Image: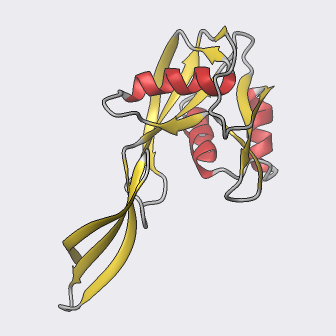
Amino acid sequence: MRRTRTVCDEQVILHDRAYDVVRVKLSVRDGSERIRGIVRHRGAVIVLPILDDGRVVLIRNERWVVGRALIELPAGGLEPGETPQAAAVRECAEETGFRPNSVERLGCFYTCPGFSDELMHAFVARGLVAQSQQLEPDESIQVCPVSGNEAMAMADRGEITDAKTLATLLLAARRGVL
């Protein structure tokens, strides 16, 4: 496939904890230039926690950006120097109150490649040990354990609308985890 654009210049216009918003000048195939805004992201993880009884730990997460709570799997950004595996353990423990004894890689995917380079690493977590949630001050998360079949049915009914959760459930189902 032939490249249709070349990056000529990048300027960070907003630096946040997990990402930068960047103004990019592109040279396109016809010789003209375009200006685009993109998100440069450190990367993130999403975790499918499975309890010893086989239930999946979903969360109800208040998402102020969309103005409502979404049913999701626990997820979050990589800290500087952190491996995806370590981030998966940390995020699962923080958001669900269950620390996994093991995490297994399911795969990875880009979340919104039209404007972001965020690469999401998906994991299955097992051997969950109960502890207390360790939420950020601006997080409001409720733990919602359901059977794997119910999680898939919720996706089918449109009750799960979070793309990263849908992608991870699909990966898990295709690999025989659910």
- Image location of residue 146, percent across then percent down: 80, 27
Count of all numbered marks drawn on residues in the image: 0
Report the residue at 51% width, 22% height from top: 90
Asked whether residue 4 is in view, the answer is: no
Report the residue at 67% width, 11% height from top: 131
Q: Quadrant of residue 93?
A: top right
Q: Is residue 19 left or right of residue 64?
A: left
**In the foreground, 40 or 154:** 40
- Image location of residue 127, percent across then percent down: 60, 9
Asked whether residue 81 is in view, the answer is: yes
**In the foreground, 63 or 125:** 63
**In the foreground, 47 or 52:** 47
Q: Residue furthest front?
A: 137
Position of the N terminus by quadrant:
bottom left
- Image location of residue 82, percent across then percent down: 35, 28
Colour convention of the picture: secondary structure
Q: Quadrant of residue 64?
A: bottom right
Position of the C terminus by quadrant:
top right
Q: Is residue 3 left or right of residue 167?
A: left
Report the residue at 61% width, 34% height from top: 173
Q: Is residue 27 above or below residue 52?
A: below
Q: Is residue 64 above or below residue 142?
A: below
- Image location of residue 96, percent across then percent down: 68, 24
